[in-house]
Image (cartoon, coloured by chain):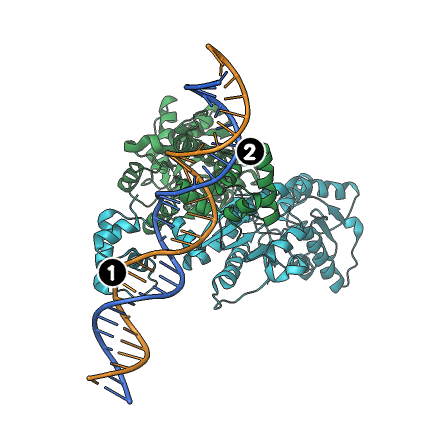
Chain colours: A green, B cyan, C blue, D orange
Amino acid sequence: MVTIKQVSEMAGVSSATVSRVINNTDTVKEKTRVKVMQAMAKLGYRHNVLAASLASNKTNTIGYVVPELHGSFFGSMMAGSEKVLRKANKHMFVATGHSDEKLETQEIEALLSRRCDALILHVEAVSDEYLIHLAQQDVPLVIVNRYIQEIEENCISLDNELGGYLATRHLIDQGHTQIAYLAGSLFKADGLNRLAGHKRALSEAGISFDETLMYEGDFQAQSGEAGIKALAKQGQCYSAVACANDEMASGAINALRELKKNVPEDISVVGFDNVDFASYLTPGLTTIDYPMREIGAMAARWILNRAYGDHKMELTHILEPKLISRGTTKQAAEN
Amino acid sequence: MVTIKQVSEMAGVSSATVSRVINNTDTVKEKTRVKVMQAMAKLGYRHNVLAASLASNKTNTIGYVVPELHGSFFGSMMAGSEKVLRKANKHMFVATGHSDEKLETQEIEALLSRRCDALILHVEAVSDEYLIHLAQQDVPLVIVNRYIQEIEENCISLDNELGGYLATRHLIDQGHTQIAYLAGSLFKADGLNRLAGHKRALSEAGISFDETLMYEGDFQAQSGEAGIKALAKQGQCYSAVACANDEMASGAINALRELKKNVPEDISVVGFDNVDFASYLTPGLTTIDYPMREIGAMAARWILNRAYGDHKMELTHILEPKLISRGTTKQAAEN
DNA sequence: CTGACTTGTTTTATCGTTACCATGTTCTTA
DNA sequence: TAAGAACATGGTAACGATAAAACAAGTCAG
């Protein structure tokens, strides 16, 4: 492997000068620069980032932990971050936590061992305490899609309550008054907050929340189907369904079809997340957009701000969801 | 930052011994090991992988280039690799090439600068020559979803021709004889090979390939719609359509619906890739499974084999696609 | 013409490990 | 019991860079 030393010898300068040329860190006479460049080219020199990082105590690398690599959800987030980081010449070291406490911890430790300049974490299993402790150490940290009061400055998340509100509000605006709700797992913050938004929209419109029109699922398509069937069994009456996510909405639509209900003619359906397939369904699924890409970008901006002192960007901690109106919702029929 | 030196002092041993304990690289008396471990715990020592890599000339890191991070395609591939590499305690450094020659080259160089032990590349814009040259250097290399004769030992790809064959063969088996084909971009190897498979299936069944029943699209949903409309305009007659990928199939189905054709009752449709949303469509899309996860896993196995001398695994260069039969294909109506 | 600056460069210490060689100690075994 | 093997550990030179201090030469105002 060619070293900076060999380059410096061939160019007839010291290795410090070569380092300057490589890093553009200090003034170097044009003539010297050219000599160095030529020597590098001739020897086929390749900068050793490892050695540089060790010496400079900076890796220009952001450690990134996501639950999974497959599926498009986290991919979008990483893509958002990548775009921002690329411009700043920072790189990402990606690890997966698989929603397992031990693994998550292990990967975070590994990233720190690699001396990442900062971390972006989407972790689900480690405790708040662990993260709080981590945040108080010297490595800048952004926690995505999780809100922890004590270190809220390090958190970025979506306003799920607002999303739930917007979904139901959309249905109300279209004249629906009997609105069923297929909730996600209510032991999860997201599930709970979305439901809270639903309730707020109802109450704002003077509609009282009817417990019997709600079904608690688990964010899976299967539970959307189950929800519709359960409501049917109870003989519930409604003209619209708001769902905790798109998978459940998709399941619900299938179940409604089985019950010979047309969507959206008989029943309107709204989802949440705006996953890829939402637009491929027929009719296209009306849903709430979960701006993962933007969240990823924002996380990266915070990192740039905190770890590299770039203060030129606009920053927020809470991102706002938007309603995407497609084909599964429709003006309520007149009574 | 706590160093190995400080640990060694506290434990009353030399730094060499501490290194031995950390790396489990040599026998150390149990009593000494305990002393060292305690010192590490007490000082809150964290191994510096950078320094270790520099000294040992090994990073245990695989450089990974994919075209994009978003979408589930490459995510699945990375997930497949990650699972294999995790078991071997290797990590992935992910970079994106965005199908741009300059970017791809740049990222590959960056990974080499970081002294990755090996590379897994899914690149589309760099030339074969560049890759051939790279393969002949000292860094082990696996090229995914691309076949380059001169370095076929480094390539892993799907048998697209077989996939195309299976799709059309499936239609023929169901009694279809007039089969339209919506091709992908034919300047791409994948598009060409899938079409070739289609032709082989036809010829094997004694059906002659009818140029007018083919439309060249570009792998986008839009072009699937366009294809069906173009065929309709020409007044073509067919009972089944094979598509170059699922997006085009989805577009085709929408166009067929517009033409008041029922899928699969009037027209059978088969896609290619088995993307996530294929199973969410109603009816579910019959398609050819592109085993990205398995491809990623295989790439990782090759790396383990080549870069780390693990010879215990079964390896292949060409993976086989499978037909996934869902609801968009159906026995041809009797004449 | 001189002292203060600026510019360009070298010198040398340092970053935190690992790898190799040397050395001392403890088992085996004939 | 002596010799050699196996075990346990220490010393120290790399690994390939950067950074801070020191120095040399050129510029310029007064």
The 10 Å Cα crowd at callout 1, few under 14, some 14 to 19, many 20 or more, is some
**Where's residue B126, x and y in %?**
64, 47
Between the residue at mark 2 and the residue at mark 1, the CA separation in whole angstroms equals 66 Å
Name the subunit of mark 2: A
Number of numbered discs overlaid on the protein picture: 2
Which residue does the image show at 53% across and 61% down from the upper left?
Answer: B302
Residue B334 at least partly seen? no
**Where's residue B45, x and y in %?**
28, 48
Give the residue pinned by disc 1: B33
Which residue does the image show at 41% across and 57% down from the upper left?
Answer: B89
The 10 Å Cα crowd at callout 2, few under 14, some 14 to 19, many 20 or more, is some
Name the subunit of mark 1: B
Residue A218 at least partly seen? yes
Which mark is drawn over residue A327? 2
Q: Looking at the rendering, which quadrant does residue B172 occupy?
A: bottom right
Which residue does the image show at 42% across and 45% down from the upper left?
Answer: A220
Identify which amino acid the numbered label 1 is placed on: Arg
Identify which amino acid the numbered label 2 is placed on: Gly
In the depicted structure, whether residue B151 falls above or below residue A74: below
